């Protein structure tokens, strides 16, 4: 398939993927197993990632990022995932969903205090939207921010927050008014503000090396200058955020499928049963054909959507389709890859085993498969 994707890629895309792979090979791969088992990775990795130029891909250079667009972001994910840990990649990547609302607000004070240090790898940033009682229904957010003079007093709870157990910055969606959609606002809340509490990291099916938090806010006093964008603009900001988050999750989907397929293909050549490589059995060969077809289909759609975004379009329907197609590919291909590995596919030191667990989240995070279908149906009917 060499060259098949060339019409999408130029030298900058290839350079970003190669650079991310170099970083992942050196800084992630030697530790991937231990960090996955520990449920956390070395905090110093943020600074190393920033120095290597893999942290700020997709963020403008004038806010401290590396520049690049949607397709560059996918290339970065492709390279980083070669390190052997989805958890580390998504953990480092939580800034990718936390910072855009601040960047879009063009508030130089917030950009200087939060965006630049995060992109330098000095701070960890999380996006806190989901709550114990509401996820898909963003307009159901109850965490309340009540204005008193120059301060907001925040009370409530957030759930499933990636990197949240050690984030320095919580970009938190709060209810500032009664209107379900127009009454939501984002606040930049430093996690060391009195009244911010974090419970023990949540234990998950996959993404082990990325910590996931349950947070509580009790009378948390946040300066009004930490309001991101105009009051009441939070729901719109979440919806804008979702497009790139969903494209990135589509990226995780096809990359997960592709890596599992490549590992399984190699194993089918190497592993012998009944006196021949298992790849010589037609049932295994055809399984690999199905896997290759799903990878190609998913990846092509994700590239196409990313290229459209980079042309300035906002293909909301196709972003949702890509997320679902890529999540399906990840689930199906990792299932078959585990099968091809047999018993070795069930062992925790095997990246394919890890990927088969990591894949499950792709149908849930960033908007579930059912919500994607609701969006698509609204746009096609
Ligand atoms: C590992 C992990 C990391 C995460 N990281 C973050 C993070 O960093 N920040 C953050 O804010 N959130 C995060 N989330 C939360 C994630 O975005 C939500 O879990 C997701 O949006 C689903 O919300 P929910 O869990 O409340 O499910 P619910 O919304 O309660 O949905 C439950 C079920 O009902 C279905 N459903 C709901 N509404 C409809 C409908 N209208 N039509 C049809 N079916 C429907 C859903 O599809 C699902 O199957 C994370 C979650 C996980 C598991």
Image (cartoon, rainbow, N blue to C red):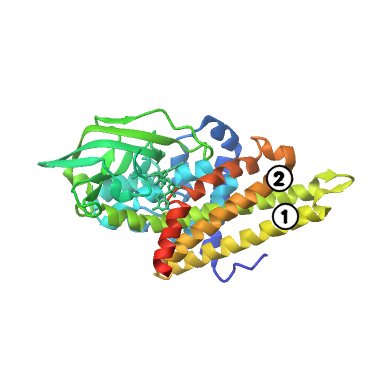
- Quadrant of residue 272 within the rendered picture: top right
- Quadrant of residue 33 within the rendered picture: top right
Q: Does residue 25 appear in this view?
A: no
Number of the label disc, if any, that sits on residue 339: 2
The picture places residue 234, in percent across and down from the top left corner, at: 26, 52
Q: Is residue 191 or residue 331 the one in the foreground?
A: 331
Q: Secondary structure at mark 1?
A: helix
Q: Is residue 224 or residue 114 the one in the foreground?
A: 224
The picture places residue 375, in percent across and down from the top left corner, at: 41, 61
Instruction: State left or right for residue 350 relative to residue 370.
Output: right
Whether label 1 lies within 8 Å of ligand 1 gets the answer: no
Q: Are marks 1 and 2 in contact (CB under 8 Å)?
A: yes
Residue highlighted by disc 1: 287
The picture places residue 143, in percent across and down from the top left corner, at: 26, 40
- Quadrant of residue 68 within the rendered picture: bottom left
Instruction: State left or right for residue 140 relative to residue 24.
Output: left
Nearer-N-terminus badge (1/2): 1
Q: What residue is shown at x 50% (from left), y 45% (from top)?
A: 361
């Amino acid at each position: 398939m060499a060259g098949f994707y060339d019409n999408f890629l130029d030298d900058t895309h290839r350079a970003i993927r190669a650079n991310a792979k170099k970083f992942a090979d050196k800084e992630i791969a030697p530790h991937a197993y231990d960090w996955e088992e520990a449920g956390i990775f070395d905090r110093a990795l943020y600074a190393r990632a920033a120095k290597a130029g893999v942290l700020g891909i997709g963020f403008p250079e004038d806010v401290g990022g590396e520049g690049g667009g949607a397709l560059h972001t996918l290339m970065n994910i492709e390279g980083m995932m070669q390190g052997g840990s989805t958890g580390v990649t998504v953990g480092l990547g939580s800034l990718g969903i936390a910072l855009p609302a601040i960047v879009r607000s063009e508030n130089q004070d917030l950009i200087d205090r939060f965006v630049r240090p995060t992109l330098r790898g000095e701070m960890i940033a999380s996006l806190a939207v989901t709550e114990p009682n509401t996820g898909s229904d963003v307009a159901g957010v109850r965490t309340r921010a009540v204005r008193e003079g120059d301060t907001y007093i925040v009370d409530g709870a957030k759930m499933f927050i990636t990197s949240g157990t050690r984030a320095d910055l919580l970009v938190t969606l709060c209810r500032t008014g009664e209107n379900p959609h127009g009454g939501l606002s984002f606040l930049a809340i430093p996690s060391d503000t009195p009244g911010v509490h974090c419970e023990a990291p949540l234990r998950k099916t996959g993404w082990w090396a990325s910590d996931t938090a349950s947070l509580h806010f009790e009378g948390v006093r946040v300066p009004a200058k930490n309001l991101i964008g105009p009051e009441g603009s939070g729901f719109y900001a979440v919806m804008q955020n979702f497009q790139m988050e969903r494209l990135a999750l589509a990226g995780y989907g096809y990359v997960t499928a592709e890596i599992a397929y490549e590992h399984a293909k190699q194993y089918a050549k190497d592993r012998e049963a009944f006196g021949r490589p298992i790849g010589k059995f037609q049932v295994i060969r055809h399984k690999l054909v199905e896997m290759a077809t799903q990878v190609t289909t998913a990846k092509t759609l994700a590239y196409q959507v990313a290229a459209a975004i980079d042309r300035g379009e906002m293909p909301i329907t196709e972003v949702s389709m890509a997320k679902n197609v890529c999540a399906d590919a990840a689930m199906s291909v990792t299932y078959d890859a585990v099968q091809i590995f047999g018993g070795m596919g069930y062992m925790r030191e095997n990246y394919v085993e890890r990927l088969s667990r990591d894949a499950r989240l792709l149908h849930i995070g960033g908007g579930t498969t059912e919500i994607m279908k609701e969006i698509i149906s609204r746009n096609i009917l």
